[in-house]
Image (spheres, coloured by chain):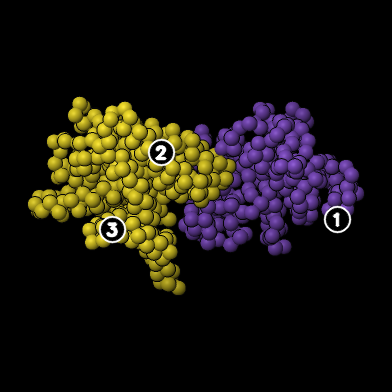
Amino acid sequence: MNHQALLRVQGLSRSFGGLRAVDDLSFEIAQGEILGLLGPNGSGKTTAMNLISCALVADVGTIEFDGEPVQHLPAFRLAHRGLARSFQLVRVPAHLTCLENVISGLAFGPRGVWGAAARERASALLARMGLADKADALAGELTYIDQKRLELARALAPQPKLLLLDEWLAGLNPTELVDGIALVRQLRDDGLTILMVEHVMEAIRALCNRCVVMNAGRKISEGPTAEVLVNAEVLTAYLGGAVNA
Amino acid sequence: MKLPQKRSLLLTLAALAAAATLPVFSGNDYYLGLAINLAQYSLMATAWALFSGPTRYVSLASVAFYGIGAYAVAVLGDTLPLPLVFGVAVAVGALLALLIGMATLRLSGIYFVIFTFGLAELVRQVVTWYEVNITKTLGRYVFLDVTSQQIYWQLLALLAAVFAFSWWVQRSRLGLALRVIGEDETVARHVGIHVTRAKLLLFVASSAFITLAGAVMAPRWTYIDPAISFNSVISFQVVIMALLGGAGSLFGPLAGAIPLSLLFEFLSARFPNHFSILLGAVFMVIVYFVPNGVAGAVGDWLARRRKEKRA
């Protein structure tokens, strides 16, 4: 499996002042799998996502994406190489129309698309997210759920190799959750590799091939989803007990 | 925000062409002077909004570029042909903008505002120091064979060029990049936008136009010194005009520059000793009551009316 790893994280650490938000984190994601990144609030999941997407620079450690070290690249260059992400608190430019939002995911980088071709592809993506009739609406006027869909459409627009989803399924009602899970599964079946931070157990069980569990910045467990979830240590971490990993 | 249509650009260019006939109908120097003032501030406010509108970076450095343009003409006007002097002015202004941009565009919000303000003062002090200690003069005379009509036409031509450039940018990939940057730089980076380069390009273009405005205006001053050419009030006026009109749209700055140029003209003529106080009051009223600018307010009103019609 080693030679197929799309993303390889090794010894990643990042401190803020005296706090080691991410501490010696290592894991791999194989081509075509969904890896869940779990852990209680404040365990460093979002910091790890920011490091992997080059929004933050690691103090030490290496990140290999598609066989090449990327830890010192600026975020926009990593985006050009095929990494796209969503944000924990949805981020869509509010004064741009939905169509423009998706086009902003398509237009930039060496393989950027513009003009009629971009509009066509963006419309198709909006339709896939069920937002076809909102193409000319401003993103700020959408409901929270629709904004999440729009953000995902933008992330998918450049046809990334790796998608980082930061609690994309949080805050959905039961029906929307079923739809959301089906959508993410479809993306994987289409060949996309996904790293997802998630708290919704139903989604984790349904989607993740493997999981990495973090607590206090460190990896405390890793393995196939079913095994990881019964691991007592994980339960303790979620229940807030002291963990001496 | 709606993208400007080709029709509105053509209409504006036609309006500018009509404005260019003014000296033919009126031999009155006062009206020509007023028209030059209007054209100058329309040009500077539109050029300022070119960068600051979409990115929302408030620059108070306009007068640094304006002054550099004026000084380029004052220093070189006697020795070089005027078009070449303009070329040198643009090159110097663009180079300075590039250096400033690389140093400051990582700053955001209030830090950028303060830095640009300080920078304009620095340029003024450096020029003053140089004139006093090296050339041993404080002021310079600009005696060039350029008539007021020609200055007026040059300003209108520049204004047309800014509009055409801005219209083109807004419809281009670069324009979309700038709007995303203005809304959320983090998103901009993660969708693959080279944020620094995009901001730098527009800052340089905007500054080059403002430098040219100063260069074109220099012969009209006849006498310049650092206190005149680098007067920070000019920067503030440009900002407030663009903001009143609405920096987010192509023609917004015009809607601020025209009424405010007239108002400032009136105030400085009637209340020369209290001008600064009145200027401050105007700033506050505008920021408080029209935060999105006239263009923004009109846009909101139109959107509301459309919604009511649908309902």
- Mark-to-mark CA distance, 2 and 3: 27 Å
> Where is residue B282 shown, x and y percent of the image?
35, 61
Is residue B276 visible from the viewing direction of this image?
yes
- Mark-to-mark CA distance, 3 and 1: 71 Å
Palette colour of chain B: yellow
Identified by mark 2, the residue type is Leu
Circle 2 or circle 1, nearest the eye: 2
> Where is residue A241 shown, x and y percent of the image?
88, 53
According to the picture, the residue beneath numbered tag 1 turns out to be A239
Q: Which chain is purple?
A: A
* Quadrant location of the C terminus of chain B in the rendered image: bottom left
Is residue A206 visible from the viewing direction of this image?
no
Name the subunit of mark 2: B
- Mark-to-mark CA distance, 2 and 1: 59 Å
Identified by mark 3, the residue type is Asn
Circle 2 residues within 10 Å: few <14, some 14–19, many ≥20: some
Total number of numbered labels?
3
According to the picture, the residue beneath numbered tag 2 turns out to be B122
Whether pointer 2 and pointer 3 mark residues with C-beta atoms closer than 8 Å, the reply is no
Residue lying at 26% horizontally and 57% vertically, measured from the top left: B272
Question: Which one is earlier in the sequence, the residue at label 2 or at label 3?
Answer: 2
As rendered, which of B265 and B227 lies closer to the eye? B227
Q: Are marks 3 and 1 on the same chain?
A: no
Residue lying at 80% horizontally and 41% vertically, measured from the top left: A218
Identified by mark 1, the residue type is Leu
Name the subunit of mark 3: B
